[in-house]
Structures are given as structure tokens and as C-alpha cells.
Image (cartoon, coloured by chain):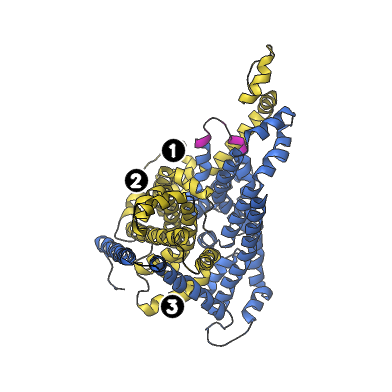
Amino acid sequence: MSTAELSTVEKFAQMGLAIAIFAAVVGIILFLAGIFRGRRSDWLVAFAYLAPTVLMLAVGLVYPGLRTIYQSFFDAAGTNFVGFDNYLTIFTTRDQLTVLRNTVLWVVVTPFVATGIGLLYAILVDKARLEAFAKTLIFLPMSISFVGASIIWKFIYEYRPDQGNIKQIGLLNQILVWLGGTPQQWLINQPWNTFFLIAVMIWIQAGFAMTVLSAAIKAIPEDIVEAARIDGVTALGMFRFVTLPAIRPAVVVVLTTIGIGTLKVFDIVQTMTGGQFGTSVIANEFYSQSFRSANEGLGAALAVMLFLLVIPIVVYNIRQLRASEAR
Amino acid sequence: MSTMSAPESAVPAVTPTPSAAAVAKKKLSSPWASLVAVVIATLWTLPTFGLAVSSLRPERQIKTTGWWTFFTDPQVTLDNYRAVLATEGSGGLGSFFVNSLVITIPSVIIPICLAALAAYAFAWIKFPGRNVLFVMVFALQIVPIQVTLIPLLSLFVSAGIAGSFWTLWLAHSTFALPLAIFLLHNFMKEVPAGLLEAARIDGAGHRQIFFRVLLPLLRPALAAFGIFQFLWVWNDLLVALTFAGGGEAAPITVALANLTGTRGTAWHLLSAGAFVSIIVPVTVFLLLQRYFVRGLLAGGIKG
């Protein structure tokens, strides 16, 4: 609002003011809800409790969402109606097709690899000594921001030209040099650079998979496991015929949740390559088109694409949940 | 286990230890299992460890040698942290760190309070259209925030609050509501109806029931969602980049993302800066891990 730099004290003062205003609003709501009397008072209380939420959702989510769908049928400046041209651009231009290909790679590779590693680790450390500590190690990256994780991994991938006595400062290239290879520009060489970005997402998400699946494994009734043991089922057979069927619903939830999160991945691409070198994905391309290239129409169409791609995953997820509840 | 040991102990030769299959499995797979587990654990911790070591090395060292050199040639300095924490001058991330706090605190408090009220209405008050409205709020969870950003930005511009903290508080609070309501509603529904009925017979109104009966029971749920939202807002880049840009309300994630973009990467600032930005969520997370895991298992994760 003001052009002058705010001092730290002023910032916290502003924060205090915001919280005070909010507290006053909630206070008024509770007060009003308290004085309603009579037969219909329940309705009025419900209305008072829900009013701020409904207002915020209507103005902050529903209206902007509809507005974006509308804008996706307009040109770059947002003034002339162009029909489905923006969507056509997404499916026909070479750059946009690369974006789509990358998005598919991300959404297919990340959930399965992250879930696989998470499941493997959950089984390996199950009932082991220091289990809680071992799990925390894998789980910690979940609390690190995508930006922070990207910086951590940029440091791993860092490349120094292979000449004279210049030393590598990135661990991956140093390992390569120790093994007698030549250092690589991991983030620039296409098309493999996308996989090096995906590795960061897997690193973050495996902990989530591990936690949920570990809880599911622990929830398997002991008598089923015992019965299988008495029957002499091998370790692999135990996994195949006892563990996996029992945790299937949890696996589906984990896969779809990571899939949805991956679909919207923006921070990693933005921080590591900025979408250059053929690494852009839909969520990043949305940002570039909307804010860098000032192509409002295409940006809106990309956002809508994101929305459309989330829906089948969610529907599948809900169906699986229903099916497992019915059983 | 106990059901197994009974028939086994009937045979005196066999000691009542875990079943033979379990022992065999352990003997076969244990060394390999441990090795694989250690490899994964190393892969998952080494990158962060490398960054931590780097952040303590002098600028010249960071830029010319890898962090593993530290073990043969240990040189420690706090200069990077001093540069990063300075609130004034170029390279200082101190003010961005303050911004992150200022953005995050209200963005956690506001949606929790509003969602608790809304979840109560959905769970325990009968009113016409309740189910339809609840399904609509539930469905809003799947709306990707990208869809909302540009129109919201125009709204904020016309309201005259563009670039201020207010935009971030409002946006983060709004985006959090569907998941928060869903989670809290699920927890509230688990409270036995008899408990509320008893309170009502004692003459308690909605307000008393909400504060005296439900709120104490909901503490774990509120904590779980609070941590989610804290991590989400603290770690967010997209919303902050859209509404605060590089302006005076920009949080530390935006500042760090900008630093990575500059040519001839400022590794000494990046490593220390990233570490400072990581410390807060990791601490919160470690302290409240119990609640976080419980929240995850209750089916809430925002993407």
C-alpha cells in the first residue's frame, strides 16, 4: 500500500492489526449467534458461522475460477474472443507439446518411484531398532520448502568445466570424476534434465509415502500375518499375498495424492531451470505465459488444463475409497 | 505372538521364541535389508548435510572446492550467516525472514478459526441445504490455485491492496478453507452425539458447546491442520510471487528463488539462506511430528 519501506516493527504492527480485526469479526459472529432465540435460531447460528467462509470461498475461489475459464477463450490481451485457439496452441505448438510431454513424465514417474521407495523403506525399517529415527530421516525433506530442496539439489548437480585444475563443487559430478568420467551439465542436457528435476520431487515425496504406508502395514491384523507364517509363506510371498492386498487402499491414496501434487509442481522447475532447456511443465508454463509473456489467454487455458487433469485422478481416488469402504 | 507360543511350548524341545518363519526371514534378508535401508537413508540425508557444511565455509572455498574438502581442510566461518541475516544492505535476507513470519502467523490463525466455526455448523447444526453446501465446499479442494491467481490479482489491484501483506493473508486463508473444513468436520463428527446432547440438556447453547465441549477435544486436529498450513504457507513460492512479487511483502522463498536466478550464483548466500529458511519449518515439524503424522493419516494433504 505504502511506497516507503516498512520497518520490522511496522510489519508486526500491521500483523497485529490484521489479527485484531479478524478477532473482532469472529467476536461479532459469536455474539450474534448467542443472542438468536426461538424456533429458527439454529438456522441463524449456522448462517452466522458459515457466512465468512462462504463469502471468502465465493470471492476467492469460485469467482476467480469461473473468470479464468472465461478468459481462456480470449486472446493474449484478454479482449478478443478466440474460441478454442488457446487450447489448440497447447496441443499443436512444439514448445507446448514439450511442456505436455514433461508434465506426463513428471506425473507418471514421480508417484510410482516415490511410493516404491517409500514402501520399500517402510518394510525395511518396520520393527527395526531406531525405527522412529530412521523414519524421521526420510520424512524430514517433507518439511523443507521446494525452493530450499531445489537449492540443495542444485548444489549436487552443479557443473564446472572439465579443464585445468578447476575442481567440481557439485557432488554428482565429483563422483563421476572420481569414477573416471567427464562432468555433465545435468540441468541443461536434454531430455535427461527433466529426470534430474523429478529426482528432487521424489526426494521430497518419498517420506509422505513411507509414513502413510508404514501406518497401513502396522494396521494389518496380527492374526493374518501369523496364519501366513504358520503356512510357511516366504518373505516375498508374505509381501505379495498378505501385505500388498491389505495396504492396497493406502497405496492408491498415496499414488493419487502425490500425482496431484506433482501435476501442480511449479517451484522446483522455476527455481532450478526457470523452465528453460526444455524442462517446463504446465504449472510453470502457466506462470511464464501469464506473467512473463503477458499472454493472458494462453495462461488461463493452461490453468484450466491443470484443473481438467486433476479431476480424473480425484474421481479415481474417490471411487477406490468407496470400493474399499463397501468391502 | 502369544497365540503361537502356546502349541509350541507344548513341545519341550522348542523354545517359545518368535515363529520359525519369522526367524528364517530375518536371517535371510537382514544384512541386505539393512544395507538397502542405510543406502536410502544416506541418499535422503547427504544432500542436506552437504548444504549445512557448505553454509559454514568461507565464500572462496565454497566457490572453488566441494563441501567434502571440508574434512581434509576444515575452515569454518559464520560470515555467510552474518551476511544473510543482515536486515539492511544487499544480500541480506533478514527482512524477508521477518516477512515470512508476518505472512505465516495470520495465515494459520485465520483459516483455523473460520474453518472450526464452519465445520461445527456442518457437523452439528441442522439447516436446509446443509449437505449440498458441504459437498460444494468439499469439491473446492480440487481447484488448483493457479486457476484463481490472475482474477484475484485484479481484484486486489482494484481494492488498492496489491503488493501488501493483506493480499497474502486473504489468499492463503481462502485457499486453506476447503481442506481445513473437511479435516475438522471429520474430527467433529467422531465426537459422540450423546456428549453434545448431555451438554444441551444442561442448558448449553451452541457457543458453550463449541468452546467447552468440542474445542478441547479438537486440539489434536487443530494442531495437525495448523502444522500443515504453517508448512504450506512458509514454504509457498507461487502465491507469494504472484501477489507480493519482489516487493516489500516478499517472503524468504521468493528472495531465495531470485538469488538462484542471478548469474554467477551466490552460493555462500544461498547455502546459508536456504538453511535459515529450512530451520523454522524443520523445528516446528520435529516438535509436532506426532500431530502432523496423525493429520496425514486422517487424509489431508494439500498439493
Q: Is mark 2 on a helix, strand or loop?
A: loop
**Parent chain of label 1:** B
**Parent chain of label 2:** B
Which chain is yellow in the rendering?
Answer: B
List the residue tagged with mark 3: B154
Give the residue type that dot 2 points to.
Answer: Leu
Classed neighbour count for the residue bearing mark 3: other residues with Cα under 10 Å, few (<14), some (14–19), many (≥20): few
Give the residue type that dot 3 points to.
Answer: Ser
Instruction: Report whether A66 appears left or right of B248.
Output: right
Instruction: Report whether A93 appears left or right of A283.
Output: right
How far, Cα to Cα, is label 1 from label 2?
A: 17 Å
Looking at the picture, how far across and down is residue A113, in whole percent? 64, 49
Q: State how many labels appear.
A: 3
State which mark lies toward you, 2 or 3. Answer: 3
Q: Nearer the viewer, residue A50 or A192?
A: A50
List the residue tagged with mark 1: B73
Classed neighbour count for the residue bearing mark 1: other residues with Cα under 10 Å, few (<14), some (14–19), many (≥20): few
Q: Do the dots labelled 1 and 3 sit on one chain?
A: yes
Q: Is mark 1 on a helix, strand or loop?
A: loop
List the residue tagged with mark 2: B78
Look at the image and say whether residue A130 sits in the magenta stretch: yes
* Earlier-in-chain disc, 1 versus 2: 1
Q: Nearer the viewer, residue A129 or B139?
A: B139
* Earlier-in-chain disc, 1 versus 3: 1
Chain A colour is blue
Q: Which residue is drawn at 37% across and 41% down?
A: B76
Question: For the N terminus of chain A, which image quadrant?
Answer: bottom left
How far, Cα to Cα, is label 1 from label 3?
A: 54 Å
Q: Give the magenta range.
A: A123-132
State which mark lies toward you, 1 or 2. Answer: 2
